[in-house]
Amino acid sequence: MPVEPAIAALLEQINALPALSIRSTDPEVLREAERELGASMVPAEPIEVGSVRDTTVPGPAGDVPVRIYRPAKQGPVPTVVFYHGGGWINGDLDSHDLVTRRLCRDIEAVLVAVHYRRAPEHPFPAPYEDCLAVTRHVADRISEFGGRADRLAVAGDSAGANLAAVIAQTFHAEGRPLAAQLLAYPVVQFDADTPSRAENATGYILTAEAISDIQDLYAGTDPAVRRSPKVSPLLAESFHGLAPAVIGTAQYDPLRDEGQAYASALQDAGVDVFVRNYDGLIHAFVNLFPISSASEAAVSELITQFKQRLG
């Protein structure tokens, strides 16, 4: 299936712009360029929720900024901790504000969005440690958030989905199982040699070169670190007992095959998994639902499946 027309038009504009080198460009320049591109390419009105509050949570190296979204629904509701994508380098609370508002409204859950420390200034394990600290904080004080102790979940996209998958594994190892995990086009194996990485190496926003640069800046070059399940969750020894998973991948995404492989590994271990590869879509489609009908349909389905698992 060809790329959806609305996304094809977006790609034409993006591919006409001069490319910035992730490895050699100042990270703040990269972040500002991404912010400006996102605002110009995907304009959208904010989604109304019950309330939004910016605050901080104690972390291993100081306070971690978080944004707490509460739904209009009153009474105990599920709680979802969300980790934004952006290759552990870009992304922040604002870049995914529309996505987290959508999740809060449609799931009727409290959303806690985490702005973890980012590479290259703060490589692995800093982002993971911040996300783990916030998730533990929320779990230990669930009455202050959604209020349902058995309905804590994690979610993220791309690098954020990597963090969500790793946090789900960590919580399971600690004997604190989560209710569900939502993983949109997750990074689950560094140095993966898959057909999708070759087929979609250029032209679809996330390139093979960018993946190589991002992974080096996040985890360095030590093979032992890159193979660690805390970096490559697909390489964990066991997946038995992990939280039910909702996994979405895209046809024209270099990460497609590893996301599908993670879904298969969970299914083989007896985990409840909903997985869908969305034809005609690209990496970052969860951010594109305001301008793409196919992305809207995909996001709607993933949210529906996630909500079902949250009860």
Image (spheres, grey):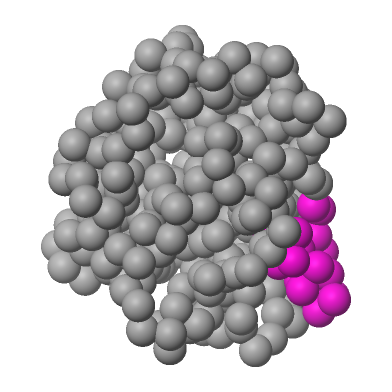
Q: On the rendered structure, is 109 left or right of 87?
A: right
306 up-or-down from 116: above or below? above
Where's residue 275, x and y in %? 80, 52
Seen in the image, is 245 located left or right of residue 285? Answer: right
Q: Nearer the viewer, residue 103 or 220?
A: 220
Q: Where is residue 265 drawn, in percent x and y? A: 77, 73
Specify whether residue 1 is painted magenta: no
Residue at the image point whose x is 51% and y is 36% from the top = 205
The foreground one among 69 and 140 is: 69
Measured from the top left, where is residue 62 in percent x and y? Answer: 14, 62
Residue 95 is at least partly visible in this image: yes
Examine the rendering and report whether any part of residue 94 can be seen: no
Q: Residue visible at 63% across and 74% down?
A: 234
Task: State left or right for residue 302 relative to residue 112.
Answer: right
Residue 41 placement: quadrant: top left
* Region of the chain picked out in magenta, as a range: 259-275
